Amino acid sequence: MTAEPVLSIRNLSVSLPPGSDRPHAVKNVSFDLQQGEILCVVGESGSGKSVTAQAIMGLLPGNLRTDEGAILFGGNDILKASGSERRDITGRQIAMIFQEPTAALNPVFRVGDLVAETFRIHTNLGASEIRQKVLDLFREVRLPEPEQIYNNYPHQLSGGQCQRVMIATALALQPKVLIADEPTTALDVTTQAQILKLLLDLRREHGTSIIFITHDFGVVAEVADRVAVMRYGEVMEIGTHTQVLQNPQNDYTKRLIAAVPKLAAGAPRDITGSLVLEATNIRKTFKSGGNWFQRGRSVHAVNDVSVTLRRGETLGLVGESGSGKSTLAQCIIRLIDPNSGEINIEGVRFSDLGKAALRKARAKIQIVFQDPYSALDPRQKIGEAIAEGPVIHGMKESEARARARSLLADVGLDPEAFDRYPHEFSGGQRQRICIARALALDPLLLIADEAVSALDVSIQAQILELLARLQKERAFAMLFITHDLRVASEICDRIAVMRHGKIVEEAVPADLLLHPQQDYTRELLAAVPGAHHRPQA
């Protein structure tokens, strides 16, 4: 006899407001969650994954409403529960971990007090008992120095530590169901591996049932018992981990799996272009403030790093958060000035340029950032954003606008989109706009700083293909910063591994993947989701 599911979704539909591109955010969705099971819900942005979770938690935005269906928990439809009953269920028995922990944590409160609030609202425990329970939770989620962490503010913690605080909050009252909405997106691979292991340990130790929302099939391969694939608000396929990953039945599932980057290197290219970038012995030290009683602390963010790049070549810069990757890129483009070292861009000593000369020379270097939405001015039409750089550097406005339209076509967008605003585009389209803007000045060097880390796998594959095509056509050099070795192995000619501000290993992808020389590189490879086997050359 099959055990009664802990949670059942029955024919759930959530309508979108009038004027949306489709009538429903979620349409006729049904699935069960068993005791101690991890159900991975997979799909692209807009597929309805998070809306389904919000419907379960009673957190739907005001412009969305549940049309029909039932959400059964303990035999009762929680959609029909009163407000107090619903709060008691979602406060005590169903909990949620959100994708962006720094946005979910109130920045004006210490993190210990944020977790303690759950106990103050839902229990009658005294202050000392609550503090002890919070410290015990911090130890359970493997946070270092719990007493110190308790008194820290969110901005004083790393992304991985903030996510552990969120997990501690979710686990405070030992819920039966845990919903994890993209909890490892944009985390580096080692932190991601730690969070996944933590969730698996919690399932084993407490029998917690988990709905794990993700777009990363590598993560699915690590943790899922069953998998539900969603598209446009509907469940396209549902089955066991083995059924869906090894024998998918739906064409959409097959396309998603095919788009997942593989930890494998292609044949090396013969790069003969002229030298574009030569950065030598770059150092950058940040100092924290001291006082009369205590000396300040120095952090060597970049410590004696040298890199070179030729036209048409891509150098991958890989490492954990805080390894110095982005700081090195900012030193190269001189968004921050290094303490020492020399930067030459096609023979020009970039590191010695004054303000006026630097402004002119920066046209040779452009950067694409991780979050395309925050990189674009929401009040500026995208055509104007693309044309702005050439106009600033002396191009006639009519010519710059014509170039912007041409670039929109080059990155696969309709030139007629020139007069639209950033909010009218998807995340992948916005990243294409940022790439078009970066290429408007025909740079010698393009820096892509985690430019695909937050994108769905299918959109990620499209952006990587776009970058490779544009580089072939325009022969720019590219510094590709990422925490994902799978992505680096697909697009890069060489990969440099950074740790604690230093490059600890550099090699072509085949050598790095098959014959890593450093223990740290081997740790990074072992932490790649779904990569338990040695990659093939």
Image (spheres, helix red, strand yellow):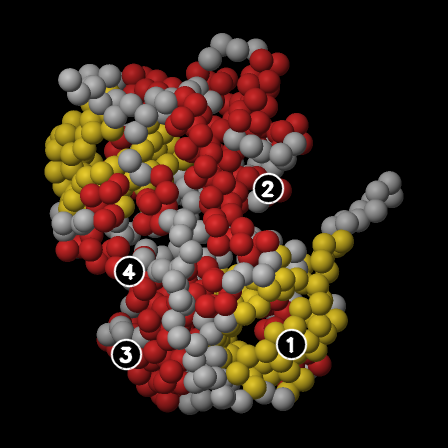
Quick one: 156 or 187, which is closer to the camera? 187
* Vertical side of 202 occupied by 434: above or below: below
218 vs 359, nearest the viewer: 218
Tell me which label, 1 or 2, sits earlier in the chain.
2
Q: Are marks 4 and 1 in contact (CB under 8 Å)?
A: no
Secondary structure, mark 4, is helix
Which circle marks residue 166 in the picture? none
Quadrant of residue 130 in the image? top right
Instruction: Name the amino acid, label 2.
Output: Leu
In percent of the image, x 46 and y 59: which residue is there? 485
Which residue is found at the position 62% from the left and 42% from the top? 156
Are the residues at dot 1 and dot 2 in contact (C-beta closer than 8 Å)? no
Residue beneath disc 1: 279
Dot 4 corresponds to which residue? 259
Can you tell which of label 4 and label 1 is closer to the viewer? 4
In three-dimensional space, the C-alpha distance between marks 4 and 3, rounded to whole angstroms, equals: 23 Å
Asked if 440 appears above or below 449 in the picture, the reply is below
Residue nearest the viewer, comparing 527 with 300: 527
Which residue position is annotated with label 2? 157
* Alpha-carbon span between mark 1 and mark 2: 31 Å
- Looking at marks 2 and 4 on the same chain, the residue that comes earlier in the sequence is marked by 2
In whole angstroms, how far apart are the C-alphas of marks 2 and 3? 42 Å
Is residue 306 rendered to the left or right of residue 388? Answer: right
57 up-or-down from 220: above or below: above
Residue 409 numbered tag: 3
Q: Quadrant of the C terminus?
A: bottom left
Tag 4–tag 3 contact (CB < 8 Å): no
| Upstream in sequence: badge 2 or badge 3 | 2
Callout 3 secondary element: helix
